[in-house]
Image: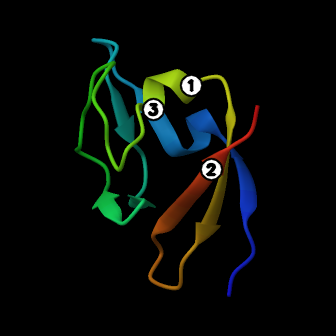
């Protein structure tokens, strides 16, 4: 099994001009898969997570063999 790595929020997500967020890479969160092109606003929950609440935090994630980044948690 791959070891978890620490990522800065902005390494994985980008903020669009309208304030929405979009992942830069394919990610998995609690069994839900999504990637670039998926756009969400504050209050929208993917895989049980409102990513706006974690914009200033670092992310614990594991890169899977298929290239998908599996988000496992957030650092305070």
Q: Which residue of the protein is positioned furthest toward the front in this rendering? A: 48
At mark 2, the secondary structure is strand
Measured as percent of width and height from the top left, residue 2 is found at 69, 81
**Residue drawn at the location 65% of the way across and 23% of the way down:** 56
At mark 3, the secondary structure is helix
Q: Is residue 53 above or below residue 8?
A: above
Q: CA distance from mark 1 to mark 3?
A: 7 Å
Q: Earlier along the polypeptide chain: callout 2 or callout 1?
A: 1
Q: Which residue is under mark 2?
A: 73
Measured as percent of width and height from the top left, residue 25 is found at 43, 55
- Tag on residue 51? 3
At mark 1, the secondary structure is loop
Q: Quadrant of residue 22?
A: top left
Q: Earlier along the polypeptide chain: callout 3 or callout 2?
A: 3
Q: Which residue is under mark 1?
A: 55
Q: Is residue 70 left or right of residue 1?
A: left
- Tag on residue 23? none
**Residue drawn at the location 60% of the way across and 36% of the way down:** 9
Q: Say which of 7 and 53 sits in front.
A: 53
Measured as percent of width and height from the top left, residue 57 is found at 68, 30
Q: Are marks 1 and 3 in contact (CB under 8 Å)?
A: yes
**Residue drawn at the location 46% of the way across and 23% of the way down:** 52
Measured as percent of width and height from the top left, residue 70 is found at 52, 64
């Amino acid at each position: 099994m791959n070891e978890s790595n620490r990522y800065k929020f902005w390494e994985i997500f980008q903020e669009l001009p309208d304030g929405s967020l979009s992942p830069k890479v394919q990610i998995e969160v609690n069994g839900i898969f999504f990637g670039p092109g998926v756009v969400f606003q504050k209050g929208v929950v993917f895989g049980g997570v409102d990513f706006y609440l974690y914009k200033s935090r670092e992310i614990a994630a594991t890169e899977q063999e298929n290239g998908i980044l599996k988000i496992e948690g957030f650092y305070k």
